[in-house]
Image (cartoon, rainbow, N blue to C red):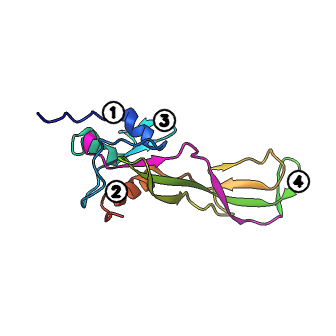
Amino acid sequence: MPTPTPSVTEEDLAAVCAGRAIPSAAPYAGTVHPLVVIDEWLGRYVDSVYAINKKLDNGTWPIPKIQLVVCVPFDHDASVTAGSCGRNWKRKSDGVAGELLLQRYKMTIRVVVARTGKTLQTKALVGSLPTCGGKFSSLDLSVEPPWKGYGSEVTVSQINQYATAVSNQPVK
């Protein structure tokens, strides 16, 4: 009599991002790698946000077949300085001059092998680069300079595009 395959739950898949292995998960092999995107901030997969997760929901990639977990980090607000608009920016309220730094949101996505809980690869995704004469998604002039002007955040579309590419990459 065959041994039944242990069931894998959504919680198990979320725990992979913390390094927990699922020994009964599918091996990382083949030419298409069933995967799921887990948003660590939510602690689970979000089918309505990440398009590739629809393959899990519609049964194309049933949970026991999942090979990889794409982990979107909890810290969605990390950023890097990408330039400066100079030190001559003036705050209208009081005329204080200071430097305006251009910030890009940055998110490091990890791909983890479900069966081992080990990171396979990482990729840094960045949001848009703001321009000195353009609009900022965030700019707080109430603080002392240097001020930081932010471009847009990393988009769901960028994450979906990366996850789709990972699902079709050669085995590493």
Q: Are marks 2 and 3 in contact (CB under 8 Å)?
A: no
Residue beneath label 1, please? Answer: 9
Left or right of 111? Residue 41 is right
Mark closest to the chain's N terminus, 2 or 3: 3
SS for callout 2: helix
User: Residue at 42% across / 36% down in the picture?
Assistant: 44
Q: Residue furthest front?
A: 1
On-image quarter of the C terminus: bottom left
Which label is found at residue 42? 3
SS for callout 1: loop
Q: Is residue 59 magenta?
A: no
Mark closest to the chain's N terminus, 3 or 1: 1
Name the amino acid type tagged 1.
Answer: Thr
Mark closest to the chain's N terminus, 2 or 4: 4
Instruction: Report the magenta residues as a range.
Output: 64-87
Mark closest to the chain's N terminus, 4 or 1: 1
Q: Give the quarter of the image for residue 81.
A: bottom right
Residue beneath label 2, please? Answer: 164
Task: Give the CA separation, mark 3 to mark 1.
Answer: 16 Å
Above or below — where is 11 with respect to 51?
above
User: Residue at 35% across / 39% down in the picture?
Assistant: 47
Residue beneath label 4, please? Answer: 96
Viewer-nearest residue: 87 or 166: 166
**Residue 28: x percent and y percent?**
31, 54
**Residue 131: x percent and y percent?**
64, 63
Task: Give the CA separation, mark 2 to mark 1.
Answer: 22 Å
Which label is found at residue 51? none
Task: Give the CA separation, mark 2 to mark 4.
Answer: 48 Å
Check disc 1: other Cα within 10 Å, few if <14, some if 14-19, many if 20+. few
Name the amino acid type tagged 3.
Answer: Leu
Check disc 2: other Cα within 10 Å, few if <14, some if 14-19, many if 20+. some
